[in-house]
Image: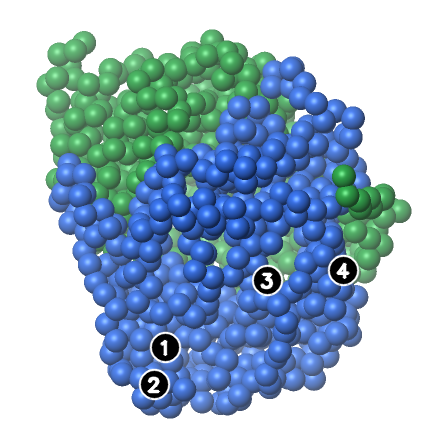
Amino acid sequence: MLLLYPLFTVIFFLCAAPQSYAKEADSKLKALNPTTKVQDLTSPKGQRIWIVEHHQAKVVSLMLMFRDAGSKSDPLNKEGRAKIAAALFDEGAGEYDAQHLKNKFLEQKVQWNVSCNEDVLEVFLRFPAENLKAVVGLLKLVLAKPHYQQDALDRNRNEMLTDISQSLHTESVAAKIALNELIYDPTHPYTRTPKQTLKALPGITIDDIKSYRTERLGRDHLEVVAVGSLKPQEFLVSLDDMVADLPSKATPLTIEEAGFKHLGEKKIVTTDIPQSFIYYLQPGIPYVDPDFIPATLMARILGSGAWESRLWNEIREKRGLAYSVDLVLQNTDHSHLLLGQASSKNETAMQVIELIRTAWQEIFDHGITQKELDLAKDYALGDFVLHFDSTAAICRALAHYQHINLPPTYVNERNALFAKVTLEDMNRVTKRLIKPQDLTFVCVGSPQQSSSAPKKDQAA
Amino acid sequence: MKKLYLIALFILSCLPSTAGVFNPQTMTLANGLQVIVIPNPIGPVVSIGMIYKVGTADDPLNMVGISHFLEHMMFRGTKTVSATEFNHLLLGKGARFNAHTTYDSTVYTIKIASAYLDLALKLEADRMQNLDFNDKLVAAEQAIVMEERLMRLDNNPFGQAYEATLHSLYWYHPYMTPPIGYPHHIRAYTRQALEEHYQKWYGPNNAVLVISGDVTLEQVKPLVEKYFKDIAVRPAPQRLRSVEPDHQGVTMEMTLNSPRITLTDISWYFAAPNHNSPNKECYYPLLVLQQILAGNDTARFYRHLVETKRLAVSVNVDYSPGLKPQPFGLSATLAPNISPQIMRKAMQEELELILKKGVTEEELANAKRDILAEFIFAQDSVNAAVAFFEPITQGFTVEELEAIPDAIKNVTREDVFKAIQVVFAKDPTLVITVFPGKVEAKIEGTIEAKKIDVGKD
């Protein structure tokens, strides 16, 4: 527990001098660090929160993130429980029915969004700083006394059923389903697909939603970040009051690291569409691995989907075979992938797959160049500060850092960690991470098998 | 000619800083480049928008989409900076950059640490005047745009409905073609046509530069002068827009079924004015009406059609006209097992109700509150300003855009009532129903998987 954590841990600070336009910054790092100062605090009742005081825009962004409350927590045959619970957050609480409650939030000019992914449930709000007290009151009500009415459940369920069933006809969704079914063990929660949700949703009851709240929305699983024009010490007291009526503890959820199967295979889901959608992947690397940062640079050099990378150049710029091609390290709580996507007309989809294979082998065999590393590092250093230009963006970035157990000092240290990566690091990590034999493809479309050889006229 | 721009006459004006949204600082160079600066020291970052007053509706009829294609070619290098250099210079500073094309505008955006504003402006000025074209690059980019079209429209279960809708809404007007063009348009683009389009539309006098971030006009001015003031004025192009004729009371009825669609959706489109057409006084009342009908989950259509009658799972209203009028659109995605006939009857009743009684004071007050609330967050990020000023390409002035909150506040119930009569007293010009194809409508169906082929190769 963090009960005795010092109330005020200043992480850092820094300032870029906007007047020095002409001067190319010698101290690149300093000039490119965000001005953000993170305070790692603990409320009187023991709730940890990261706060950034930011008085430029008179607004506050607030994130409440519940660990292990995402769709992976759905019981078997209750797939969709977390998603529908998220949808019911503003459907009535305390003395307010659904319409009344929604109006109360609108009166306080609150932008808010409750969503869940496979791992967490996020409650994100942004509102004028002057309305802080009223918003805290409303949020307390929502967390303490949700209505969970049958008609709201039915209405939201119908909308979800409609959306999900249509989404199965989107090629990227179909490909994600095929990918999950291919690589994960069928018993792992990450294998769950929208198809199972469609089957299970009609059977979800109000009692299921109530159990979700009891089991998943425990204070011991809550991560909080607030950014904006607020007074930290006052907010700590409000925070305790706001979450006081939540269960103190969530039911522990033990989920094993997802293993991968069928690596190195190619799965084609034949579909009558003119352009094939391709996922390509192999195992990635966890956040906690000391090689994670070089690995992010490597992924960028190999497959960044914006303006410069080996795959971008070979597939899009030189050959015009795709509009989109991208590669990222995709990490969730229990899985880590090096995952890319590309789209190409059926006639050339197989050629794209071969080009990806070639690039994989090439980077494995010959590593990367100093020039590539320099550009990727410069980008990583310069881009970081762009995440810090709004309370909402800062709040989301910090919530992510807190969730993956980075220290609040990370904001200060991050650029230095990227700056010190050497070419030797990069080539060692590339050799360690890249596994051409594990490169796996999932393709949705009608790729033409015969024409894997490049045709001269295809760029015309 | 040279003399003209060397005089460098600056028109500097600071707008009153009371009721506006961004309270920008503005100036115009002697060559006509309009500069809008929105100081916002929220982070050491600037967001830059280079906006050209040209879009798909300005494209030659045999090469629709060439504005979008030119947008792509603006990343393919100039006579002085190759594409690779351009990318490396910006990426080396961590910049994010992109562009988009609409019917009335082409917009280039760069977000970068404010310490590197100089570099970004230098590159924007360079590609305003020195763009390099060669046949090989044009051919490569044509293939990419073809792939983009496949992704956005041909692969999309609703792409066909979207294109058919455009065709039915406009009988003459260039808004009838999607901004990316048809495949035969894309194939028709030539290097020469591109150069002509570029020379015609990309003059400084046809452009607006928006800079938002921790800078002031005073800081920006020397840089803008340095890079842009010597760019020559080009003959001011005329933005021709055919006039869409009155559809003379004709309602087109269209149905579209597809095995890749599992929901039923009905859209109704009504002819509507914009901010500079006849009945232009309806413009702001219609924006308020849009919010009243379907702005959020407390709006009238949601309450009536989704919550009370349970006929729809979602309802939408789209009113976003451009330089020329575009229709006021309503749409509803039907709840399971609701027939289109029932939904159409219910919508008919809704329209009769507002035609007769208009909207309530409470609805009006709430809608204004919710529209105005959005502006509170305008300065929480440097991103919003570029999009906010983009309607300059639709004929709005900076002053008009800044005064939107006032215009919204001044809308009365009577204004809304009058706008309702103008739009809804006539029958819709188009009603389109999209519904599932017969055979594959089963809810458990996946994306028509014919066979699954797994194997090592």
Chain label for disc 4: A
Residue of label 3: A335
Q: Which mark is residue A292?
A: none
In which quarter of the view is residue A368 placed?
Answer: top left
Residue of label 4: A195
Q: CA distance from mark 4 to mark 1?
A: 37 Å
- State the residue lying farthest toward the right: B439
Q: Amino acid at mark 1?
A: Ile
Q: Amino acid at mark 2?
A: Ser
Give the residue drawn at x 70%, y 60%: A184
Give the answer, above or below, for where B166 lies relative to A297: above
Q: Amino acid at mark 3?
A: Ser
Q: CA distance from mark 2 to mark 4?
A: 42 Å
A166 or A296, which is in the foreground?
A296
Give the residue drawn at x 54%, y 71%: A121
Which chain's colour is green?
B
Residue of label 1: A49
Q: Is residue A92 left or right of residue A290?
A: right
Which chain's colour is blue?
A
Q: Work out whether mark 1 precedes mark 2 in sequence or the reverse, and give the earlier one.
A: 2
Chain label for disc 1: A
Q: Work out whether mark 4 precedes mark 1 in sequence or the reverse, and give the earlier one.
A: 1
B340 or A51, which is in the foreground?
A51
Q: Work out whether mark 2 precedes mark 3 in sequence or the reverse, and give the earlier one.
A: 2
Residue A116 visible in the shown view:
no
Q: Position of residue B390 (x, y in %)?
A: 37, 38
Give the residue drawn at x 30%, y 28%: B124
Q: CA distance from mark 4 to mark 3?
A: 21 Å
Q: Position of residue A254 (x, y in %)?
A: 62, 78
